[in-house]
Image: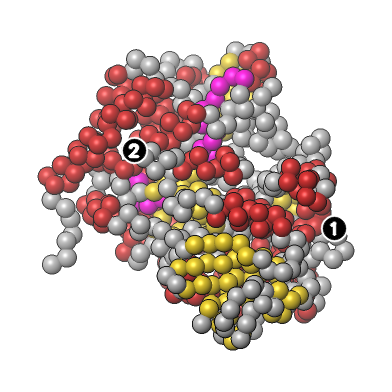
Amino acid sequence: MEKSSIPQEAAEAAFEQRLRRHEAELSELYSGLYKNREADFAHFIDMLRSAFAARKPSLRLQDAAREADPDWYRRRELLGMMLYVNAFAGTLKGVQEKLSYLQECGVSYLHLMPLLQSPKDRSDGGYAVSDFRTVQPELGTMEDLEQLADSCRGQGICLCLDFVMNHTSESHDWAKRAKKGEPGYRERYFFYEGWEIPREFEKTIPEVFPTTAPGSFTELPDGQVVMTNFYPYQWDLNYANPAVFNDMTENLLFLANRGIDVIRLDAIPYIWKQLGTSCRNLPQVHTLARMLRIVCETVCPGVLLLGEVVMEPARVAPYFGTPEKPECHMLYNVTTMATTWHTLATGETALLQRQMQALCALPKDFLFLNYLRCHDDIGWGLDYPWLLERFGFEETAHKKYLNDWFTGKWPQSPGRGELYNDDPRLGDARLCGTTASLCGIEAAEQEKDPFLLERSISCDLTLHAFMLSQSGIPVLYSGDEIGQLNDWSYRKDPEKQADSRYLHRGSFSWERAKLRENRQSREGKLFWGLRRLETIRTEEPCFDAGADVAVAESGCPHVLALSRKKDGRELICLYNFSARFVQAGVSREGSYTELMYETHYENIQSIGLYPHAFAWLLRD
Ligand code: GLC
């Protein structure tokens, strides 16, 4: 008989054992941040116990299975997709009905964009939460979410949800009480009577949204000043107050107990503030991240933490923690993403080679989430000192070049993106747009240029092939599988027009998706091309996260060559980032088979690659 639950006593004993294993460290970390707060710590431990008591049998069973198979999330079969519930299917029930489409896409990891209660017009796309336990009514209910999680679990799909922990909405109950001066609530935020201290803070805090929300503080109508690093309606929580950490952890566990498998720790580097610092990546942030990891390992060991650290590589890796004291299970591969787009705009692979070499040098158990596009803008976080030294590219000028390229200002560029948070003082704009539009598909269709269309589709597939050949979990951005174009209608929507990220947050077109059945359509070519790539990735052991990966010499500056080795097999991946037909290859003995098109090569020292084409060559 299949086991349907773990006996209550055994489950409790296992929890107590996990708690004992971690309690000394947890207590030390907690008292390090919160001096003389024994009562709060006792409350914290009680809360963990209650959260475990409330965890349902099916989740406990899954926890046990995952504990017994700690590599369960490192398999190359895992394929992610991120989507907005309303844009994709209207409601959570709608998503449930569309699970078969996601299955057809091969998705086994589903990231649902923020869906918790959030004031409609002051929401930052759901990143201003006013109640962590209620779903936005137009999307459904908490029961719907739980049901969807159950269905996903039944179909082997992990569910990821954002946990927006740096701030709450100004409409959250705590914020409302704080505003009224209720004791115990002001201390949950950063409140000041005037601008004196805020001005001091602002001397060292860089701005997140320099154009759409300048500054890091907001003055309320009654003259009080509150810290708001993001939008003025997103009030920064004060994690120096143990009540905030206790209650937010309880909220996290509430979501985990609904059946969420992956908790995305939104904006984690920002959660500790200290005067005179940048208020980012402070050591206390790592203490908090480590405590959250312990909390999950104790209460819900099947749940993973995904850190959102959109920063340079040296800042990202520390969020993995150490092998003895791990923090996040996974992090975004943000620098590779940005460098990929830089490489497309320049046609030069030198920086990407350098980035891939840096990645290859990291421990293999660092698990990255790879992506081309997500709901946010592309920030040009590149290695500028190196670009300056090597190519004489100066940071501001180069950012301008990239932005001009992808907004189609260069005559040869088919990109159709839009700027985001252009700060004229710093020349630091970021970029928005869907993969297809940035690759030229929008321009090709507008200009009715069949040659450009072919080249742009090829470019789109090549970028996806590159993303799929990186170690870690590939995550598609919903719509990219059919080449969805920019949604320019956001400019007419009063709730969206101020934020150009809505350009790539348009409604999923089910009409367009139907066209995938015609394999000669743009949708069909992308959909089935991607499916083929994903299937090859699942079947071929060289794509394993544990494979040995190295950058190889391709003999052509426009072509990136990667070698992936596993169990005596070798896969050579070649990516032509230029709009030219080139010859490239690697010095290897023996014959190879290209997996996508099933062509055979007697040797691969020099093979022809079409503009923006790629080759996945497996040694025979
Ligand atoms: C994260 C989200 C972004 C949001 C911000 C504030 O960076 O990805 O969309 O604006 O957090 O919560």
Q: Amino acid at mark 1?
A: Lys
Instruction: Residue 275: say if magenta.
Output: yes
Residue at the spot x=49%, y=68% of the render? 565
Residue at the spot x=29%, y=19% of the render? 39
In the image as oriented, which residue stretches furthest toward the front?
A: 589
72 left or right, relative to 171: left
Residue at the spot x=42%, y=40% of the render? 322
Residue 359 visible from this viewpoint: yes
The local secondary structure at tag 2 comes to helix
Residue placed under numbered mark 2 in the picture: 294
Q: Within 8 Å of ligand 1, the CB of disc 2? A: no
From the image, give the main secondary structure of the stretch colored magenta: loop
Instruction: Residue 298: say if magenta.
Output: no
On the rendered image, what quadrant is the N terminus found in? bottom left
Measured in 3D between alpha carbons, the distance from the residue under mark 1 to the one under mark 2, in whole angstroms, is 50 Å
Q: Is residue 107 above or below residue 244?
A: below
Residue placed under numbered mark 1 in the picture: 409
Is 135 in front, or is 525? 525
In the image as oriented, which residue stretches furthest toward the right?
A: 411
Q: Residues within 10 Å of mark 2 (few under 14, many from 20)?
A: many
Region of the chain picked out in magenta, as a range: 256-276
Residue at the spot x=49%, y=40% of the render? 319
The image's colouring method is: secondary structure
Q: Residues within 10 Å of mark 1 (few under 14, many from 20)?
A: some
